[in-house]
């Protein structure tokens, strides 16, 4: 039996590195497959600068930072998205001279528009882009302020994780994660532990067609626009789960079913940073370089207490810092594959 339907994850997700030149340049992705990205999340590695999150649904000039700021317009950041590249202007957060950058890039690809009153799917109109093969969609809607509103997300499977932002107001990025359940939420823009309230998801889990929102300003203020990045788990390609730390340098092993290309972790019970590690910046084990998803600080490098190994079927902690592997502490994660553990033809992937 085939283990995965995605033999080449780079067709749907890639990490891309480049050096800024404070001018204009085109950055080509380097994976095995061409990737026309619909979500580009980037960060200066060796400089204190805000993250940038750009997507094709809102348009390339519409930029989010990692903090609670509303969407802004940046005409000289990413100026175009090509079939396997993106073009840059000279904005300092995107392309400063002598600064190294990392971007993480996901493909959606197929547009949708949903008139809820006509289709009977959801109670609020939505539009966006989706890729059912990879389990990724982007959806935008206008809030109505009513708890229990439902929105079509564009996928044909249940989202495992959703990242949502109010486009018009200073509201924190809010996260639904299947390991937290429908009564809890996390803020991607802060270090706070997961919160408990029905104002985010109305105590209702997403389905294969819609997700439910409460009346929080993070998800549903009347007449304000929102964006959602939704991910559903795909065997051998993506994983959204939880683990318990052991506080030991011979740390917890987390099975994903693939060799990771990218992992983001967060303590769900305590104050901590969201940490991003990838196999493009750290090309061999031990993986000990990380970027904080919630902060504009430069990349932390060579930090053994936060380290992990990327293995052929998961990742294993090699450090004992409480932010990633505290004894008895609960964590959530999202991960994407470099290679599946076993291909669609039954061939095992190579280890790192």
Image (cartoon, grey):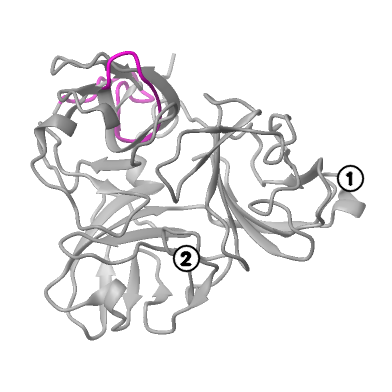
Q: Which residue is mark 1?
A: 120
119 vs 221, left or right, is right
Compared across the picture, whether 270 is left or right of 277 comes to right
Quadrant assignment, res 162: top right
Residue for point 33% across, 41% down:
273
Q: CA distance from mark 2 to mark 1?
A: 31 Å
Percent x, y for residue 308? 18, 28
Question: Looking at the rendering, in which quadrant would you find the C terminus?
Answer: top left
Occupied quadrant, residue 128: bottom right
Query: What residue range appears in magenta?
Result: 326-351
Q: Nearer the viewer, mark 2 or mark 1?
A: 2
Residue under circle 2? 64
Residue at 63% in and 68% down: 168
Q: Residues within 10 Å of mark 1 (few under 14, many from 20)?
A: few
Residue under the point 46% across and 53% down: 107
Magenta residue check for 182? no
- Quadrant in which the N terminus is drawn: top left
């Amino acid at each position: 039996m085939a283990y995965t339907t995605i033999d080449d994850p780079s067709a749907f997700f890639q990490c891309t590195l480049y050096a800024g030149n404070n001018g204009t340049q085109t950055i080509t992705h380097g994976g095995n497959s061409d990737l026309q990205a619909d979500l580009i999340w980037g960060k200066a590695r060796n400089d204190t600068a805000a993250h940038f999150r750009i997507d094709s649904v809102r348009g390339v000039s519409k930029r989010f930072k990692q903090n609670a700021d509303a969407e802004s317009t940046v005409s000289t950041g990413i100026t175009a998205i090509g079939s396997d590249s993106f073009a840059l202007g000279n904005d300092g957060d995107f392309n400063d001279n002598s600064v190294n950058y990392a971007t993480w890039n996901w493909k959606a690809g197929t547009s949708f528009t949903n008139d809820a009153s006509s289709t009977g799917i959801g109670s609020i109109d939505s539009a966006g882009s989706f890729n059912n093969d990879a389990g990724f969609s982007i959806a935008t809607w206008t809030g109505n302020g009513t708890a229990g509103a439902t929105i079509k997300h564009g996928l044909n499977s249940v989202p495992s994780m959703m990242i949502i932002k109010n486009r018009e107001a200073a509201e924190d990025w809010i996260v639904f994660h299947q390991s937290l359940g429908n009564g809890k939420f996390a803020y991607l823009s802060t270090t706070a532990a997961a919160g408990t309230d029905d104002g985010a998801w109305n105590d209702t889990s997403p389905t294969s067609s819609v997700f439910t929102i409460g009346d929080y300003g993070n998800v549903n203020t009347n007449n304000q626009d929102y964006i959602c990045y939704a991910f559903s788990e795909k065997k051998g390609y993506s994983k959204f789960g939880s683990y318990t730390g052991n506080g030991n340098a011979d740390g917890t092993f987390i099975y994903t079913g693939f060799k990771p290309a990218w992992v983001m972790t967060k303590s769900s019970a305590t104050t901590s940073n969201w940490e991003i590690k990838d196999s493009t910046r750290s090309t061999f084990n031990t993986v000990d370089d990380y970027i904080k998803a919630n902060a504009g600080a430069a990349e932390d490098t060579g930090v053994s207490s936060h380290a992990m190994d990327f293995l052929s079927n998961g990742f294993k902690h090699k450090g004992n810092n409480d932010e990633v592997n505290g004894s008895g502490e609960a964590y959530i994660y999202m991960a994407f594959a470099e290679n599946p553990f076993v291909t669609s033809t039954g061939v095992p992937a190579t280890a790192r």
